[in-house]
Image: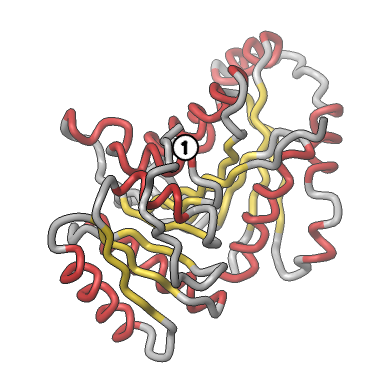
Amino acid sequence: MFDTRHAHRVSENIHPESIVVAVDGSDHAERAVHWAAEQASLEDRRLVVVAVGEDARAIADHSASLIRTLHPGLAVEALCRDGDPRRVLIELSSHVRLIVLGSRGRGTVESMLLGSVSAAVSAHAACPVVVCRPLGDQPRARGIVVGADGTPESLPVIEFAYQQASLRGMSLTVLHCFWDAAAAVAEYHRVRGEEFAAPDLEDLRAVLATSVAGFAERYPDVPVALQLKHGLVDETLGPRPSEWDLIVVGRHPTTSLSRLLTGSIATAVLERASTTVAVVPEARASS
């Protein structure tokens, strides 16, 4: 975890519950600016454009001017800071509603693991982080998908997905991924066109139904599909190319080995996806 004890007081003068978008003058950042401006407009929230390092003021002011042109009337402010952008954004995450940033695609050694800023911020931020990945050529018409693991701690992740589906007028797929030998054998035979008794998945269906209990009443406008899928989470949620408009995945607090592994799943989904991905911190388990 990044040590923020000596970080700049970057949260000064930032309105609580603002949406933050990180910019660096690149095309990847411009993609994030468009997404963040639309989100701030949908939520009627203040948008803070943050740039760090050399030419930060010019970069932040340029992006803020673009946003004001796209969304007249939206409250926008530009903020520039010195230092490590990872540290700046991670400290900011404790004071804002959402952080949005862009990410380059694959193709060079430098781009592996999304680049250090996207990887670090999505792994350690206290608030949800949206990473706007380079989009593939395939049309997106499937709405939003969220990974559900059936635990009470994952409820903030599912709620974030419902909120986005409601704001954007999209359908929502709540997906639970599972892995076992019987299902793997059944899938093998199914692909070969052979008959095979499928494993009993009723318990998993019950877990999935429990995960969304109560949300239908709170978000009656959201069409929802519950889906079980056999396979690894990152392979199931983030294939390339992706037809989803938004993928939502949870991230456990990094306080144990199992949670570190779960955190790496979120990073793997980000690396595979060719669409926008939201990484949402899960709640801490009650002791």
The colour scheme used to paint the residues is secondary structure
Residue bearing mark 1: 123
Q: Is residue 136 visible?
A: no
- Residue farthest toward the bottom in the current orientation of the protein: 73
Taking the image as shown, residue 27 lies to the left or right of residue 7, namely left
Q: Position of residue 276 (x, y in %)?
A: 42, 52
Q: Position of residue 229 (x, y in %)?
A: 64, 31
Taking the image as shown, residue 67 lies to the left or right of residue 263, namely left
228 or 151: which is nearer to us? 151
Q: Is residue 113 visible?
A: yes
Q: Tell me the element at label 1.
A: helix
Taking the image as shown, residue 145 lies to the left or right of residue 149, namely left
Q: Position of residue 135 (x, y in %)?
A: 32, 52
Q: Amino acid at mark 1?
A: Ala
Q: Quadrant of the C terminus?
A: top right
Circle 1 residues within 10 Å: few <14, some 14–19, many ≥20: many
Q: Residue at x 20, y 75 (%)?
A: 62
Q: Is residue 261 above or below residue 239?
A: above
Quadrant in the picture for residue 117: top left
Quadrant in the picture for residue 250: top right
Q: Residue at x 41, y 67 (%)?
A: 36
82 or 23: which is nearer to us? 82
Q: Residue at x 40, y 65 (%)?
A: 35
Q: Position of residue 176 (x, y in %)?
A: 68, 34
Q: Residue at x 43, y 83 (%)?
A: 75
22 or 287: which is nearer to us? 287
Quadrant in the picture for residue 48: bottom left
- Number of numbered discs on residues: 1
